[in-house]
Amino acid sequence: MHAAGPRPRPGPATTSRAQFKLGRALPVLVMVVVVVADLVTPDSERVDRLLFTVPALAAATWSVWGTVGMGLLAMALRAVLAVSRGGAAEDELLASEGLILAITAVAAWISAVRTRYERDLAEVTAVADVVQRVVLRPLPPHLGPVELHLLYVAAAAKARIGGDFYEAVRIPGAVRIMLGDVQGKGLGAVETASVLLGAFRSTAYDAPDLGALADRLDEGLARYAAWDPESDAAERFATVVLVEIPEDGYTGKLLNCGHPAPLLQRGAGVTTVDVAEPSLPLNLAGLADSHHHVEEFPFGPGDRLLLYTDGVSETRDRDGVFYPLEERARQWADAASERVPELLHRDLAAYGTGGLDDDVAALLIARTGGAAPPGHPR
């Protein structure tokens, strides 16, 4: 799986399409059942009452004119069946035909309302797609000396963007990568994430080091909060991990602002990249003396670094046990890098009680190149 932008959860879209097809078929199936019952059952007049449901069922999936057509077809079928049985009382036939006609009129109105709602929803979804591409742009599968493979799932139903965010840019001589998680959920978290993404994109190219970059991210949030003090961004904090992978050399740099420690895989071994002095989350620096400690770690060809948010590490099973990410990472040590996000997604969905209930972001960074230099730890 190549790196990509935010992905909808697999499954619901396919299920919706199947339900839509079944919904379109139901009015026809009802009429078929009535005809078959008329041919094989002497007491089929009771089954005829199912024809009253035809226009109502059509309203759920058919267009306005399609719903009207189904209603008129049900009326015609009702009349034909009545004649085929040797006729029916005229008053009774007119009453049943009038009832079907009335149901058809109401069903056509419902279909018109549904169609208008679906059109509005499609327009809103199109706008959301544009916002997604602007706020959370797809990552390239290759960037400088690394491959990037992303898993991103928003917790909110139908949402494409959540409070987790990511970005990667190539600067002269290196690649800088950010992955973070905004406190809370909803539109306020998306607003804060968009502010941090904008600050990263505007400062990652010229910040002298990761410490200065973290300061500028903090400044970006502070300026936004001053510009709009009523916004949620003024109140929320965000945990962030910043990584710099030089194009020359086999040492990576990492700055952790209150974020879960990344996992480093070298060969079959998996360890956490802990920092001696972790920084405070962004937007909390004013609560204490702010200083940043940048950790260096060996990162040669074939090594992989997994960044993730707490939506991964804090997923619990039915017994309340946290997801064993480090153990799973060891099991997937021999898996191709592009397969790891999909393996992680499936395993998380199966492990968590009721699936995933928080935003999930995980970014696998794989160092490309030839053989590791002599002395590189394995």
Image: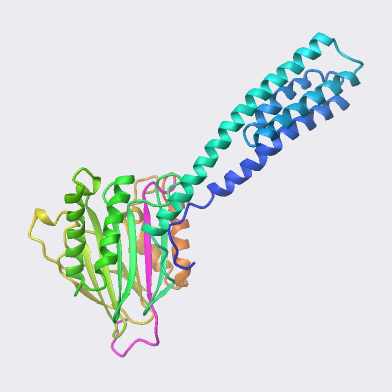
Quadrant location of residue 110?
top right
- Residue 177 magenta-drawn? no
* Magenta part of the chain: 355-378
Is 357 drawn above or below residue 206 in the view shown?
above
Q: Nearer the viewer, residue 286 or 55?
A: 55
Q: Residue at 83% of width from left, 26% of height from top?
A: 37
Most extreme residue toward the right is 86
Counting from the top left corner in percent of width and height, residue 280 is at: 16, 58
Counting from the top left corner in percent of width and height, residue 246 is at: 29, 80
Most extreme residue toward the left is 289
Q: Nearer the viewer, residue 122 or 174?
A: 122
Counting from the top left corner in percent of width and height, residue 187 is at: 33, 45
Kindly report the secondary structure that dominates the magenta region of the rendered protein: loop
Counting from the top left corner in percent of width and height, residue 197 is at: 30, 60
Q: Nearer the viewer, residue 278 or 130?
A: 130
Q: Residue at 85% of width from left, 22% of height from top?
A: 81
Q: Residue at 78% of width from left, 21% of height from top?
A: 48
Image quarter where the C terminus lies is: bottom left
Q: Please count the marks in the image.
A: 0
Residue 185 in sight from this viewpoint? no
Quadrant location of residue 195?
bottom left
